[in-house]
Each structure stands twice: as C-alpha cells, then as structure tokens.
Image: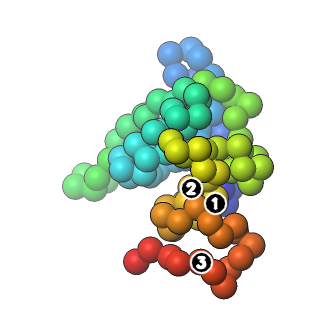
Amino acid sequence: MSLLKFEHKIIDLDDVPHRIIEADVTRERAVFLQNLLLINHHKTKIQEVPAKEEGQPSTYNLVTPDVTFNPIVKVYNREIRTSDGKKVTPDYWNQKTTQLEPNYWDKNKKRFLG
C-alpha cells in the first residue's frame, strides 16, 4: 500500500514524468483509487505491468503526471474526499473499511472488512 511507503518513484510515460501512487496492485484497486482521485480533481492513469511469469495475472500501477502528489500527505491531512464530501481516512484509502469514521487513532471503534 502506498501509505506504508514514503518514497514514491517517478517514471517516464511518453516522455512525461509521472509519479507512481501505487504499484503492482489489482485492476480493481487501481480503479478504486483512480475514481477517488478523479473526484478530487487529480489526473491519473492506470498502467498495466506484464506478468513476471507465464500464467500469472498482470498487475497495474496507478500514476499521476503531478510529480508533487504525495498520497501520505493528502490522506493524513484529510485533503481527499469522497463523492459526498466526507473526508477519506487511511483505512478507507487502504480499503480496510467502508466507514469514514472513526479517525485512524480511534482503534477501538473500528469495524474492519472481512
């Protein structure tokens, strides 16, 4: 998950630098984050990463041309919002829960998925 890794690499796509928001994720995860960031007016692209071994599924990278974008800062500063205007929590970003409250420090009030 990108919130666990401080350094986010920069790659070139069509001679334009892009910052990797999340690397080697499923298509569903990439689409979830892309939709969330689109609501917040951040341009993103989903880049397919070919499977390393035959028979393995492809993975995907979610990238943005905004090389200053840092998901850790955006999420923990509560700058990312859902379509209905609620602030995104780290657990929501990481798809651990669908609840936007409690805050990340209220561990005894959390309800996790699965």
**Nearer-N-terminus badge (1/3):** 1
Q: Alpha-carbon neighbours of circle 3 within 10 Å: few (<14), some, or many (≥20)?
A: some
Q: Quadrant of the C terminus?
A: bottom left
Q: Quadrant of the N terminus?
A: bottom right
Specify whether residue 43 is in view: yes
Of discs 2 and 3, which sits in the foreground? 3
Q: What is the spatial separation of the Cα atoms under label 2 and label 3, in whole angstroms? A: 14 Å
Helix or strand or loop: what does disc 1 sit on? helix
- Who is closer to the viewer here, 103 or 72? 103
| Residue 17, horizontal then vertical, whole percent | 63, 22
Q: What is the spatial separation of the Cα atoms under label 2 and label 1, in whole angstroms? A: 5 Å
Residue at (66% x, 26% y) in the render? 66
| Residue 33, horizontal then vertical, whole percent | 49, 45
Q: Tags 1 and 3 in contact by the CB under 8 Å rule?
A: no
The circle drawn on residue 110 is 3
**Residue at mark 1:** 90
Q: Amino acid at mark 1?
A: Pro
Helix or strand or loop: what does disc 2 sit on? helix
Residue at (50% x, 16% y) in the render? 14
Q: Tags 2 and 1 in contact by the CB under 8 Å rule?
A: yes
Model colouring:
rainbow
* Residue furthest to the front: 84
| Residue 39, horizontal then vertical, whole percent | 52, 35
**Nearer-N-terminus badge (2/3):** 2
Specify whether residue 6 is in view: no
Q: Amino acid at mark 2?
A: Trp
| Residue 35, horizontal then vertical, whole percent | 45, 39
**Residue at mark 2:** 93
Q: What is the spatial separation of the Cα atoms under label 1 and label 3, in whole angstroms? A: 12 Å
